[in-house]
Amino acid sequence: MPKGKKTTLNAIEKPAAFGPDLDLGAFKRETSPWPPCTISTLPEDIVQRALSVGISTEEKERAGTYFQIDHSAILQTIRKTFSGKAEIMTTGEALKKYRWAKEYWWKIVAADTDKFTALAKLKWDQGYFIRVLEGQKITIPLQACLFISKDNFNQNVHNLIIAEPNSEAQIITGCTVHPNVQSGLHVGISEFYVKKNAKLTFTMIHNWAQNFNVRPRTAALVDDDATFVSNYMCMKPVKSLQMYPVAYCKGANSRVRFNTILHGNQNSHLDVGSKVVLQGKGSRGEIITRAIASDNAQINARGLLVGEHEDSKAHLECRGLLLSDEAFIHAIPELVGKVKGTELSHEAAVGKIAEEQIQYLMARGFSETEAESLIIRGFMDTSIFGLPDVLKKDTERMIDATFGGAL
Amino acid sequence: MKTLRIEDLTVEIAGKRVLGGVNLEVPEGETHVLLGPNGSGKTSLITSILGFPSCHILSGKIRFNGTDITTMPTDERVKLGIGVAFQNPPQIRGVKLGDVLRHLTRRKFDEVKLAGTTNIPVDFFGRDLNLGFSGGELKRTEILQLLAQRPDFAIFDEPDSGVDVENLEVIGKAINEFLKNRSGLLITHLGHILRYLKVDKAHVMFYGTIACSGKPTNIINRIMKKGYKWCERCPKVKRLH
Ligand SMILES: Nc1ncnc2c1ncn2[C@@H]1O[C@H](COP(=O)(O)OP(=O)(O)OP(=O)(O)O)[C@@H](O)[C@H]1O
Ligand SMILES: [Mg+2]
């Protein structure tokens, strides 16, 4: 047996560094395949859930779509206007089609990291391959939806995203479950390669179920003059979600930004962070997190900046808002400077809504409830994220749906 | 009867007695000025009039237009027609000045015209409330909000502190125009703004109570010349001490 396989097998028992441990045997793997279909012939209940995670069924609003239900990739299309500019297929197909693809496979995420990476290697259920070709600027977003239709089911996808030199694109990934699904486990490995002078904006939106468990494992490699922006949003209940994506600013003048919006509610346990490793000359990183905890939610909001180049700079900002006495937020910002000259800083604040702010707005005639929702809505102000317009509208719609819209 | 009437008001904040037996009446159509050394209780009186929960009323009554509002929630008092431009407004991240102005004006307003009344650049409407505003900008946006709110009874807590000469004239005239057919209470330390305003009466606060009331020019001129030391010699203030 090759050594890689063996260490992976050994890792299948290895609990993750963070988050509650799970018994992998508790979830079903068997399912019947879904037949391929088009976005307009998807069943309405699936469409409704897909819309809740930023997926559009209007063909003209997206440059291309990948849709996977359980283990079946049911749809991979690129609109005609964009063919020859970007590619979408299953990662299985991509590995067959391109011999070089394996150079990007399990290269920045290690299969033996923990039981979840091991599971994704041993029980791999496709995932998407998206490649933006050299010099191409895709003006409207590409989208991918990872969907689970059965209760207590386990889905393990492995995605590969490559932005070739001088390309530019936005990708929206929505992950969700059928309304009948209560529990289950989703593992998603994602490896991003942002090549020289490319710009990739990746927005991931999650909408799971009360007893559902989620373990994404993500890494990005960012080349010279390239920019990687990762936006993550989870506003709905989940049993446990643990992720700690990492971006390596390997190239000179590489830029990375992680924006995270979390709303922990009911009994959700969220352990979410972002890491930036500054390796290139002139590399810059930024992590911005907004976390709201209501009901009995527990949130660990992590952040790690590692400075390995003397000309590098990064900032981490984490703000947590507690809306219940039973909820809890633990902000854990970490800075590791390995060379002199690197400039790392952080700012973290956790608290409840300041009474003074509510009083002030009430003095301007807002009711107490209006004042609270205005403050919460302001706390979730996405304008600081600098999202492209399409995404801004989508995320605002989702925040409004959760916290009440404009007054 | 747009009259504010405070009767024998005693208030505690954070376990400390900040007001003791305040009596004050501002009849309809009048504007009064409230003076007093730092920490004498002027702002505490304003937050008590607004009914902030931090102000524990131990005794006394606050009436507005004949209605007893002593225990009324803040937003209801505001609906009755009381409005305040604060001395130290809090910063609220993500809540835009424009959000509040839209609410106050019921959505429709001419941004340029409104901003012009207190000389605020229009792009401030997109800024987070009071975040990173300079001292003078804070005052001018507070006044702007109050003008947009159009309360029958307008209270200004040190609207002139930290405002430059040109802007002092702008806000002085704006406030004067606004108060023409309204009632008001204005707190000031140096009284410069009174150059542009018509005020009917002055009150001096000492140790949490109104120590003296009278003609504005007399009282202000004395205090400006001799400071509050002059007041300290007053038998009424001595008794308070
Ligand atoms: N929340 C609080 N906690 C503790 N003390 C308070 C609080 N609010 C007011 N005080 C105290 O009450 C007293 C009156 O304060 P207030 O703000 O009313 O004074 P002021 O007359 O407005 O002064 P200034 O001219 O400096 O604005 C002060 O001694 C102040 O420290
Ligand atoms: Mg004061």
Image (cartoon, helix red, strand yellow):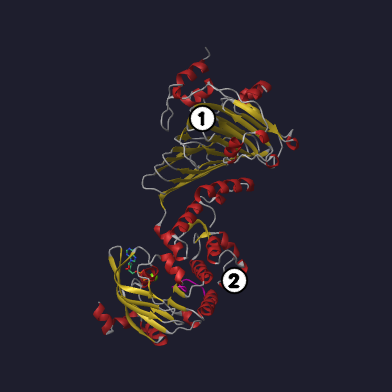
Q: Chain of mark 1?
A: A
Which mark's residue is nearer the viewer, 2 or 1? 1
Q: Nearer the viewer, residue A350 or A380?
A: A380
Q: Nearer the viewer, residue A28 or A200?
A: A28
Q: Residues within 10 Å of mark 1 (few under 14, many from 20)?
A: many
The amino acid sitting under disc 2 is Gly
The amino acid sitting under disc 1 is His
Query: In the rendered picture of this protein, how many numbered marks are placed on residues?
Result: 2
User: Residue lying farthest top?
Assistant: A1
Q: Residues within 10 Å of mark 2 (few under 14, many from 20)?
A: some
Which residue is at a point 43% across and 59% down the rendered structure image?
A368
> Relative to residue A210, is residue B100 depicted above or below?
below
The spot of residue A161 in percent (x, y) is 62, 32
Magenta span of residues: B157-164
Which residue is at a point 47% across and 62% down the rendered structure image?
A366
Give yes or no for contact between labels 2 and 1 (Cβ–Cβ under 8 Å). no
The spot of residue B3 in percent (x, y) is 42, 79
* Secondary element type, mark 1: strand
* Secondary element type, mark 2: helix
Where does the C terminus of chain B fall, quadrant-wise? Answer: bottom left
Q: Chain of mark 2?
A: B
The spot of residue A311 in percent (x, y) is 54, 42
Which residue is at a point 47% across and 65% down the rendered structure image?
A365
Q: Do callouts 2 and 1 point to residues on the same chain?
A: no
Q: Main secondary structure of the magenta part?
A: loop
Where does the N terminus of chain B fall, quadrant-wise? Answer: bottom left
- List the residue tagged with mark 1: A186
- List the residue tagged with mark 2: B116
Residue B188 painted magenta: no
Q: Is residue B203 visible?
A: yes
Distance from Cα at disc 2 to Cα at disc 1: 56 Å
